Amino acid sequence: MQYKTRGTCSVMISFDVNDDDTVSNIQFLGGCNGNLKGIGVLAEGQNIDTLIEKLSGITCGPRPTSCPDQLARALKQYREDHPAA
């Protein structure tokens, strides 16, 4: 899935959700390259709902969102489009 971010330096997030509801191949376009690679590595193989819970609401300085929060929003969008079985 590809998700166009809002309010962050990164402009796009892409990821796959596996049959067991884990997330893989997380990539951010733009933003702080090292930090976003780190987020991708830490989130790799994690359950989609766990990531939504942990990353939702994280802010970046005065901004009301962040790249982790945008990943959570992307995963929420995925979940809305593909409800859990």
Image (cartoon, rainbow, N blue to C red):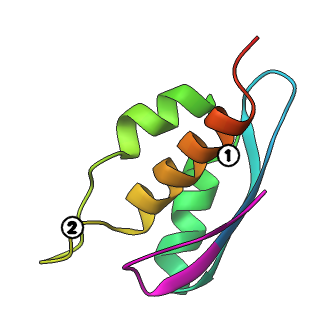
Q: Secondary structure at mark 1?
A: loop
Residue in the image at 58% along x and 53% along y: 74
Residue type, mark 2 in image: Pro
Distance of label 2 from label 1 (alpha carbons):
25 Å
Residue farthest to the top, as pictured: 85
Residue 82, relative to residue 59: is it above or below?
Answer: above
Residue type, mark 1 in image: Glu
Residue 45 appears at what percent x and percent y? 70, 37
Examine the image and state in which quarter residue 62 appears.
Answer: bottom left
Q: Is residue 10 magenta?
A: yes
| Residue beneath disc 1 | 44
Q: Quadrant of the C terminus?
A: top right
What's the mark number on residue 84? none
Task: In this rendered view, identify the residue nearer to me: 34 or 75.
Answer: 75
Examine the image and state in which quarter residue 63 appears.
Answer: bottom left
Residue 61, relative to residue 44: is it above or below?
Answer: below
